[in-house]
Amino acid sequence: MKKFFIILFLTAFSSAYAEGHLSEIDKKAALKCTGLYYANSMIPQGTLELDKIVYSISAKKFLTSYLMKEGVKEDFINTELNKSIDELYGKPYDEKKTGECDKYIYKLIPEAKGEIDKIVKSGIY
């Protein structure tokens, strides 16, 4: 958990793009957020509002595609997501961590909010 906040703090001061590509720090932080969204999407609907579950599924889908476009191998993404699920599955929704990821991702990828909203509205997640 400490690492997560340290990475987010460090990335706030690092460049989002290094010659048009994500830095290693940004990739790691984006993967952590993707894992958090993925874990949130598995929280039962009776425990978490449906709109938060749908948003989490959509954000996970967007970030997974984005990371693959940035050259991160799908197998590596899946391995990292599995680590996040092992760590976070069954834990309650963390409003603060999710909000920090939202802010981080929106700053890192300016079009992220609009693209995630499109996925939410499309119903194809």
Image (tube, grey):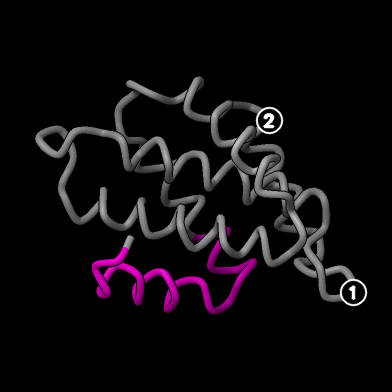
* Amino acid type shown at disc 2: Lys
Q: Residue reaching furthest right? A: 19
**Residue 89 on image: x %, y %:** 39, 24
What are the residue bounds of the magenta stretch?
103-124
Which labelled disc corresponds to residue 19? 1
Question: Residue at left 82%, top 57%?
Answer: 23
Closest to the camera, between mark 1 and mark 2, is: 1
Q: How would you classify the magenta stretch by its main secondary structure?
A: helix
**Residue 114 on image: x %, y %:** 42, 78
Q: Judging from the image, what secondary structure is the residue with disc 2 in?
A: helix
Q: Does residue 119 belong to the magenta stretch?
A: yes
**Which quadrant would the C terminus be assigned to in this image?**
bottom left
**Residue 66 on image: x %, y %:** 61, 64
Decide which of tag 1 and tag 2 comes sooner along the chain: 2
Query: Where is residue 78, by image quadrant?
Result: top right
Question: Residue at left 53%, top 79%?
Answer: 111
Q: Are marks 1 and 2 in contact (CB under 8 Å)?
A: no
Residue beneath label 2, please?
A: 3
Question: Residue at left 61%, top 71%?
Answer: 109
Residue nearest the observer in this picture, 107 or 124: 124
Considering only vertical position in the picture, is 3 above or below 114?
A: above
Spatial CA span between label 1 and label 2: 26 Å
**Residue 122 on image: x %, y %:** 27, 74
